[in-house]
Amino acid sequence: MTRERVVLVVLYDGVRLLDVTGPLEVFAVATAPDVLLLPGSADVEAAATTPALLDQVRRLAAGAEQVASVCAGAFVLAAAGLLDGHRAATHWALASDLARRYPAIQVDADSIFVRDGRIITSAGISSGIDLALALVEEDHGPALARQVAKYLVVFMQRPGGQSQYSVRLRARARPADDPLRRVLDAIAADPAADHSVGEMAARARLSPRHLGRLFHVETGLSPAEYVGLARVEAARSLLERGDEGLDVVARRSGFGSPETLRRAFSRTLGVTPAAYRARFRTTGIGS
């Protein structure tokens, strides 16, 4: 006989509604593993300094198979001492604050969600759904997780190591006639084109050295690093939306060969292109 599974969500003043309802919708559709889930709150300071809440979290966590948090919920787990010595994720805008307050935690400011033993922490808002789907897949396999994702009209969960935000968002909004804006738009429009430093500098009518400085100031990346990440994003989109072979995906995204594409994916996302595509396959309900 299959035993009943329990998901216990800790509710407290100020919790974000989607942090609660997103994962619960996943668990409601699938039979879930025993999980203690901490949603985020708009008032992180109050939540993390409430002794009664922290005592209850410690008590409940002691009996849970898995302990999870969404967004700022990581601060509650951290304040309760449950993240010490662990790697953890939170919303990118909160990551530096979490690392500063709790130096015993290895904060991952980029990943959508992170598993470290029985502790699973996720980034902001919708990533709680990715976390919940990952738990369903671990407990019941990918077929049920795909059915749940299809039912909820969401992608099969994104790999936890996927970045929280697009590389294009690293740069501030700039006027259409701005030199760097012309270069960034050209990369986004055709990632497979020639985006060597010399070619980009000519397009921006700047020296290669000046262009390199602009990239570093605006994106924190070198021109080559930025182009590489933009091509990974283009390849991700092609893998999610189509059935083209890896040779076609590699060519259209600017990598040239499947082997170069595989190396870039493994280095950036920690998964192969084939594994990434498999996670986005969906099936009909009941299939």
Image (cartoon, rainbow, N blue to C red):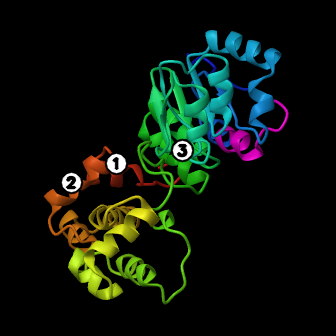
Q: Which mark is residue 262?
A: 2
Q: What is the spatial separation of the Cα atoms under label 2 and label 3, in whole angstroms? A: 23 Å
- Residue nearest the observer in this picture, 164 or 153: 164
- Tell whether label 3 touches label 1 (CB within 8 Å): no
Q: What is the spatial separation of the Cα atoms under label 2 and label 1, in whole angstroms? A: 10 Å
| Residue 78 visible from this viewpoint | yes
Q: Secondary structure at mark 3?
A: helix
Q: Which residues are magenta?
A: 12-24
Quadrant (top left, top right, bottom left, bottom right) of the N terminus:
top right
Q: Earlier in the sequence, mark 1 or mark 3?
A: 3
Quadrant in which residue 143 is drawn = top left
Q: Report x, y in % for residue 232.
A: 32, 61
Q: Earlier in the sequence, mark 2 or mark 3?
A: 3
**Which residue shows up at 34% across the image and 55% down it?**
277
Q: Residues within 10 Å of mark 3 (few under 14, many from 20)?
A: many
The residue at which mark 1 appears reads as 269
Magenta highlight on residue 1:
no
